[in-house]
Image (cartoon, rainbow, N blue to C red):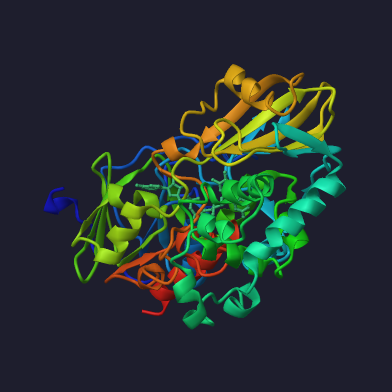
Amino acid sequence: MSPDTRPGDPAIPSAADQGARRRTVLRAAGLTALLGATGVTRAAAAEPAEAGGHDVIVIGAGFAGVTAARELSRGGLRPLVLEAQGRIGGRTYTAEFAGEKVELGGAWFDEGHPHAWKELQHYGLQRTVDQAPEVAFFPAEQGYRAYTPAEGFGRLAELVTPVFDGSKEYFPRPLDPFAREDLVRPLDRTTLIERIDALNLAPVDRAWVTGNLGGLSGGSARGSLTQMAQWWALSDWNYDKFSSATSSRLVHGTAAFIEAMLADADADLRLNSPVTRIEDHGSHVRVTTRRGTTYRARAAVVAVPVNVWNRITFAPGLPAEYRRLAEETVAVPSAKKIWLHIRSDQGLFYAAGAEGVPGLGDVIPTQRLGDGHLAYAFSADPALDVTDRAQIQASLRRWVPDAEVLAVRGHDWGNDPFARGGWTYKRPGQLTGPLRAVQRPVGRLSFAGSDIALGWSGWVDGAIESGLRAAGQVLGR
Ligand SMILES: Cc1cc2nc3c(=O)[nH]c(=O)nc-3n(C[C@H](O)[C@H](O)[C@H](O)COP(=O)(O)OP(=O)(O)OC[C@H]3O[C@@H](n4cnc5c(N)ncnc54)[C@H](O)[C@@H]3O)c2cc1C
């Protein structure tokens, strides 16, 4: 990084300049315009030796970063988005499998998600609902037992609901988790498993509850009670809404959603540009990528997952709360999502495991295919290889011995170097501890990401919420 690579501090453009500048996101970035429907086919950008002329640098092109970029451009600033990978979307990832569009990361939306819902309406994005299971397998005294879905999910609702007793009092306004901080603070030290065990459930009932909530949390001994209880409260303290938050997805995928938002931003995007160093010089920031290119701007929005904050060198170093959060991890470190093409006499089956059993945690069908059906599964088992069809078939046969897995496609989020974890699930103490501190700017840096959202943290909605906040901080300077 030599001093002669520093471009001049760009001036904030006039309104007329801004109008003249409205153009596609790919304009000056040296990219070939390959806005494929899946968003995975963009050409790699050839980074110039040096670049400047932007007001703000946004690091990370997930929903948080893209929201921030769009808002900054709406506010009259010219953002540059630096994305490590060859695609945008981050922990949302639309891919092809068994001739269908599938999501390897975030997928489901609900009208209870205020920010995401507003954007979906704004961009006119259509949703679809998955086909319902015809049979449901749950843990039994020995192995697993088949239930009708009404029976099985009815029982699950009865077992899960008491875990959240009192949440109407401690989360009376679910989008503001600190409305009754006096009640939340002591509870925030509790792990999910401590709360479940306080209910003294029979072993089979405990297996149902830990299988369901432990799976969602990525490990009931790791995660906090308050994270799940806030999701419960956000779902109107109601099991049906809690479970239906994961039932409707986008016809054209999350890729179409984020492409629509990015196309609406007057921002430049550079793919394949992992940021390694962020310097705050008081009057400006300098951001360096792995290839050694340095960019200069007045401010930066850091919109990468908390789990990778410690992979970037900050100069000066980040305050202790930021480092602590990144060391502890916020997103589930071993989260995996796997799509399966299944052939089985059982038809569309749902299967729930008991927590801690190796392999797939649960299996949820989505649609019938010409041959068999499509289903997805979650797992937090570090030993599960998401590419190993035979291992996945063996795991599936716990529930359905005749099931044949024809193909698999998964993503191991914990081993993804630019995620180092899956969906957000806070550990005890993180909500009432460092969360609010890390939402505040540090000098010329603002931070964004679903991991540090207030409301639907762990969802796309939270990413959008945080991107709006970070852009507001920069614009309000
Ligand atoms: C398996 C799974 C299932 C989920 N299911 C749902 C769901 O059904 N519904 C829902 O709403 N949400 C769901 N989520 C959560 C949702 O996907 C995330 O909350 C959201 O996408 C996070 O967005 P973000 O912008 O905060 O972070 P990310 O999407 O992680 O974006 C961060 C970006 O930063 C980039 N980056 C990282 N390091 C660097 C670097 N050094 N330099 C430059 N760029 C960098 C990354 O490549 C990435 O593009 C799920 C997540 C997972 C993993």
The part of the image, by quadrant, that contains residue 461 is bottom right
**Residue 290 appears at what percent x and percent y?**
28, 41
**Residue 308 appears at what percent x and percent y?**
36, 49
Name the residue: 66% across, 50% down: 202
Q: Is residue 355 visible?
A: yes
The part of the image, by quadrant, that contains residue 377 is top right
Front-most of residues 274 and 230: 230
**Residue 179 appears at what percent x and percent y?**
54, 82
Q: Is residue 449 left or right of residue 153?
A: left
Front-most of residues 94 and 164: 164
Q: Quadrant of the C terminus?
A: bottom left
State whether residue 361 is above or below residue 467: above
Front-most of residues 316 and 378: 378
State whether residue 103 is above or below residue 20: above
Report the label total: 0
State whether residue 79 is above or below residue 472: above
Name the residue: 78% across, 59% down: 240
Name the residue: 22% across, 71% down: 283
**Residue 422 appears at what percent x and percent y?**
50, 46
Q: Is residue 21 visible?
A: no
Q: Is residue 327 left or right of residue 119?
A: left
State whether residue 155 is above or below residue 470: above
